[in-house]
Image (tube, rainbow, N blue to C red):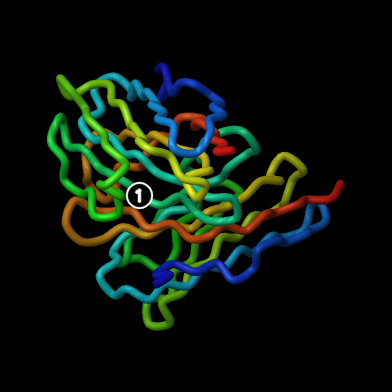
Amino acid sequence: EAGVAQSPRYKIIEKRQSVAFWCNPISGHATLYWYQQILGQGPKLLIQFQNNGVVDDSQLPKDRFSAERLKGVDSTLKIQPAKLEDSAVYLCASSLGTGARQPQHFGDGTRLSIL
Amino acid sequence: DQQVKQNSPSLSVQEGRISILNCDYTNSMFDYFLWYKKYPAEGPTFLISISSIKDKNEDGRFTVFLNKSAKHLSLHIVPSQPGDSAVYFCAAKGGGYQKVTFGTGTKLQVIP
């Protein structure tokens, strides 16, 4: 079974520039998550999709962050414009559904550095 | 508001001994708890979980204990192996769509 694929692995941009990350979840997984992990902290949920609908985006800074999951499969997360505090690892995860017993499977993340 | 807390940022244990990682939570709505393991430059991988209706779950060398009245859970690794050296995240699920809240992680080092 192929895992969650993310690209790029690393990205360096200057503040106020824009950046986009891509995620392809495990085949058949209906639920997709984007997390932000700042150094020394645990992953923080930014947005959760169930198929192609958003079920939780309460912690997404909507003035600069956007995400979509067209066709209910792969997803993109965009930051525009980037701020210094956006430097973090952005993790994508997927699961079969939202049931308690269904663990999330994570990709290896995109490490974003803002100069 | 940190709803899931791992108060020990790091832990060192000798190979063959027991590793005990602790986690506390504050939200009574959490009804499922998970531990994830993370190696550098990789995403977290699921390790073991426990439902709030149980107080113990075991999988090989890994056992998770839940004390619901104290809102505390712990992960025991016996015996510890050098390959267990990683960051361990405690996570809790609850509420609509089973949102997952992660702790800040504990870095375990198993010394050969």
Question: Which quadrant of the view contains residue A52?
Answer: top left
**Horizontal relation, residue A52 to residue B11: left or right:** left
Residue ranking furthest to the bottom: B69
Question: Which quadrant of the view contains residue A72?
Answer: top left
Question: Which quadrant of the view contains residue A53?
Answer: top left
Closer to the camera, A45 or B84?
A45
Residue found at x 20% / y 61%: B95
Expressed as whole percent of the image width and height from the top left, the position of residue A92 reads 39, 34
Expressed as whole percent of the image width and height from the top left, the position of residue A95 reads 30, 35
Residue found at x 17% / y 37%: A50
Expressed as whole percent of the image width and height from the top left, the position of residue A61 reads 30, 50
Residue ranking furthest to the front: A16
Helix, strand or loop at mark 1: strand
Label 1 sits on what residue type?
A: Leu
**Horizontal relation, residue A96 to residue A83: left or right:** left
Q: Residues within 10 Å of mark 1 (few under 14, many from 20)?
A: many
How many callouts does the rendering have? 1
Expressed as whole percent of the image width and height from the top left, the position of residue A28 reads 24, 22
Residue found at x 44% / y 23%: A6
Q: Chain of mark 1?
A: A
Closer to the camera, A45 or A82?
A82
Residue found at x 28% / y 25%: A75
**Horizontal relation, residue A86 to residue B7: left or right:** left
**Horizontal relation, residue A28 to residue A107: left or right:** left
Vertical order, B56 against B60 (above or below): below
Residue of label 1: A45
Closer to the camera, A91 or B99?
A91
Q: Quadrant of the N terminus of chain B?
A: bottom left
Vertical order, A26 against A44 (above or below): above
